[in-house]
Image (cartoon, coloured by chain):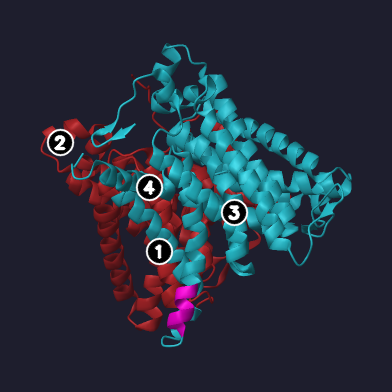
Chain colours: A cyan, B red
Amino acid sequence: MATATGIHHRTYRSELRLRTTKAEYFRLALMLVLLLAAPYILDKYWLGIANVILISVIGAVGLNILVGFTGQISLGQGGFLAVGAFTSAIISDRAGVPVPISIAIAVIMTAAVGAFFGLPALRLKGLYLAIATLASQEIIMFVVRRWEWLTEGKGYLEVNRLQVGGFEVERRMFEVQWYWILLALAILAVVVARNLFRTTLGRSFMAVRDQDIAAEAIGVNITRAKVTAFAVSSGFVGLAGALTAHYTETVTWERFTLDVSVLYLAMIIVGGLGSIAGAVYGAIFMGLLPALLTELVDVLGSSVPALSDQLPALKNAVFGIAIIVFLLVEPRGLDRIWTRMKDYIRFWPFRY
Amino acid sequence: MNTLISLTVYGLSDGALLALAALGFVLIYKATRVINFAQGEFLLVGAYMFYTAFVVMRLPLIFAAVFGVLVAIVLGVVVERFVLRPLIGEHAISVIMVTIGLSAVLRAIIQIFFGTAVREQPPILPTGTIQVAGATVPLNRLIVIGVAAIVLFAFTAFFQKSRHGVAMRAVADDQQAALTMGISVKRIFSLAWILAAISALIAGVLLADLSAVEQGIAAFGLMVFPVVILGGLDSVPGTVVGGLVIGLLKQYVSGYADPGLAEVIPYIVLVAILIVRPYGIFGETRIERV
């Protein structure tokens, strides 16, 4: 129960619940209504942005499991996305396997690749690990660019329009139908990730993050925790990659460069490390930022024509400034800001 | 034989530039334990500032160099004071991300003022060729090796002999002890960033002279990682060995095997080194105590 002085649990059951106050249920309902209404309110352009955001929600949640919850820095996100995208596209189109199965295979494949590239994490920590994952990113990119079998020498892959059983995505309703598919999968990813950290496995991830040597002393199998964290995280990323492939219907290596890894890291930094909700906020923030900036420049462009020529550079600048400002002002991200706002209202008129 | 010699000269000059770029990186890491992902952008800023002074403002070479150094000092101080200092003691992820953010901002600033087109800059170093053991090699590559050697030697002498250099080594060794001996750790941190910016300026200008003044200079910064991992993250001599090895390796692979493979071979070396000997050839092995 929420009282003016905070939430006081009286049973273990209530403490373990994901939501404890009426306000939380109300906000959940409000959010659901908004999500369900979105395709009827938004036009195609904004719905397209929403779809891209939904995919990056899955990827960001996956990355946050690794970076935010297990404390293993990864700059290899782009490479893992590429593994998921190419696997699913090739299996579904060339082998004729139904798309849901090909996506599932892509998830497993990416998890395996992630676990493999996570092996250096057993010996390396922090900065060294970051550099090792940078290398894995570059090596995966090299394989993707140079292995001609992947794209049959074209340099890119065309993916068939999504077709499951008798259902095929229509051209006219493209964004709307994809919105429902991606929304369902994004919610699934969030729920799975949220519940992962209520299990022993998830708790062992957090123990490794907080102090790995102490975790080992109390009986956490660090080797297993680290490798599983890489595998689980990469599984989510592989799902995001596979969905990118089927949604955009083309797969090229340009979509998976180091900049993408950095973008995803920025999402979880801005949203909040070690928070599933934070990963969602961060994905939304980083997805909307360039779109809103474009709108702003369009409005101002009539009076300051030079501005629209500088749009790409401005996007870069705002991106960098957003990262720096969040790290300096609120290192725990949007999630922490939101929590503080809620607390302020809940405890009012008391300060805490 | 001719191919071998020219590849060696190209490799050594690339390696010398890598060593210079890596030097700044190592200085920062040694003194402040910060991994600077913006090292390539420091090269970029250095090259464009020199270009501004030398070509746009038409200053003589020496004044252009002074202008570049002044900008490098300001850049180093501002970045250290306003971006990195508030993050002292924060988690490694935050520190890495802030330098990545910084790299995006620096690149964007250069893009806003100079655009993405390649800029023409008259050659600073002589452009002729010279016969070495029957092979024709460009003179400017040889001079780059010489300049880099002098700069690296000067930096080494600075650390061995000068008061500030010794203070820097003391801070790198043990901050607490250095503080109690009356060394201003803050000032040493600033100094490390200034020196890094200056070495990046030299590397950037030389690199621009060999290739062109363009945004691609920033990409050179990523190659620093294999170099420092090979040499050891906190070792100045390691940067020279690492730089030369990576430079030569890239040229040999590119010349004898496949130019595409040359781009990725340093990273394969990096992974191998990390697995076999994570602290590099000259790096200090640190034992973690609980």
Query: In this rendering, which labeled residue sits more in front, label 3 or label 2?
Result: 3
- In x, y percent, where is residue B162? 20, 46
Q: Are marks 3 and 2 in contact (CB under 8 Å)?
A: no
Task: Kindly identify the amino acid type of the residue bearing the numbered disc 2.
Answer: Leu
Q: Decide whether the magenta segment is chiefly helix, strand or loop.
A: helix
Cα–Cα span, label 4 and label 2: 33 Å
Looking at marks 2 and 1 on the same chain, the residue that comes earlier in the sequence is marked by 1
Both on one chain, marks 4 and 3? yes
Of labels 4 and 3, earlier in sequence is: 3
Of residues B185 and A227, the one drawn nearer to the viewer in this rendering: A227
Identify the subunit bearing mark 3.
Answer: A
The span shown in magenta is: A295-301
Question: Alpha-carbon distance for marks 4 and 3?
Answer: 27 Å
Image: A20 above or below B34: above
- Please tell me which residue is depicted at 61% across the width and 51% down the height of the picture: A55
Residue B76 visible? The answer is yes
Q: Secondary structure at mark 1?
A: helix
